[in-house]
Amino acid sequence: MSDNWDKAGLGGIDSHDGAAASHAWARARWVVLAGCLLAIPAFYLELLATSSAGVMAARALYGCMAVACAGAIAWTAHASRRPARFLRRNAYDVAIACGALLSMIGGQTPWPTLEWALRLLLMGVTAVRIVVALRAYFEPGRLALLPLAGTIMLLLGGAGFYVLEPRVHSYAEGLWLAFESSATVGYGDFAPTTPASRIFAVFVVLLGYGMLSLAFAGIAAYFIGSEERRLRVEMHRDIRALRTEIVSLHRDLDGLRDAIAPGYAGPDGGASAAPEIGSG
């Protein structure tokens, strides 16, 4: 699995790297996550901006994102014994930092088709990076965090739809649309109608798929782990029973040896050899 992450440019720290690099990356990866989260308000600020101040605020957020990602990568690369290998293993984060830098420079507003495609691509790869960064918190031993994460996602999704979708007239309706989108139910009573709300719905749906996949995978892993623990307990019990039987067999063999050769004291004991069973 680690080889797959390495090939995808999300390899993190090599297990053979130094302790300093490991400690640096343990902190730097959260800086990368924080930088990636800035892409969400930056994207929508620039998309919905009606003045140059909104555009400048969005580009400032992109600048903070670029600084956070690039700074975290550079910090860890400096602590690494093989910085070039670290950069290759984390090419995905390097690409995100470059994309944030280009977004800070900006282009035409409203966006032409090519810039739309590039910005959506940046948001897509950033969303994947956020999920990858959070995957450690949705392991079988941390299933309790899934309801909390789902609740936060719904609350933020409801707020997003309330702001972005003109047909949503209350926060409760925004929550309902967020639930419909994340659960991919689609009752049809509410639907995104503007480009901004539709793009937002895409990410809510993807996050909903991700949350459900993590939940089911975690539950399955929990039951598999429980079965493995039960099998280990049974195996240890069988081993103890087998050891007891072996000790009992040794005891019986010793008693049999004493019975058939009372004078036998072993090769070095000087006593006569035991008579052969069945000899005349």
Image: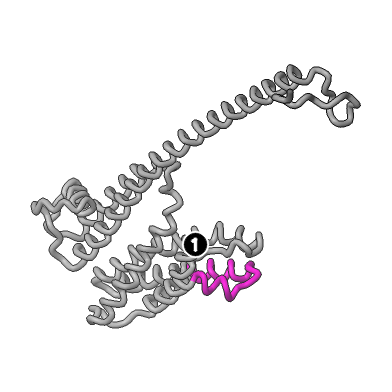
Examine the image and state in which quarter residue 224 appears: top left
Question: For this rendering, which residue is in front, 245 or 198?
Answer: 245
Helix, strand or loop status at disc 1: helix
Q: Tell me how many marks there are.
A: 1
Question: For this rendering, which residue is in front, 59 or 273?
Answer: 273
User: Which three-letter amino acid code belongs to the residue tagged 1?
Assistant: Ser
- The residue that label 1 is drawn on is 2
Residue at point 64%, 67% (across, down):
79
Q: Residue lying furthest right in this view?
A: 270
Is residue 144 something one can see in this rendering?
no
Q: Which residues are magenta?
A: 68-90
The x and y percentages for residue 19 are 66, 59
Question: For this rendering, which residue is in front, 123 or 16?
Answer: 16
Is residue 44 something one can see in this rendering?
yes
100 w.r.t. 211: above or below? below
The x and y percentages for residue 66 are 45, 71
Residue at point 30%, 75% (across, down):
52
Left or right, residue 173 beside residue 124: left
Left or right, residue 48 beside residue 143: left
- Mark 1 neighbour class, 10 Å CA radius: few under 14, some 14 to 19, many 20 or more: few
276 w.r.t. 11: above or below? above
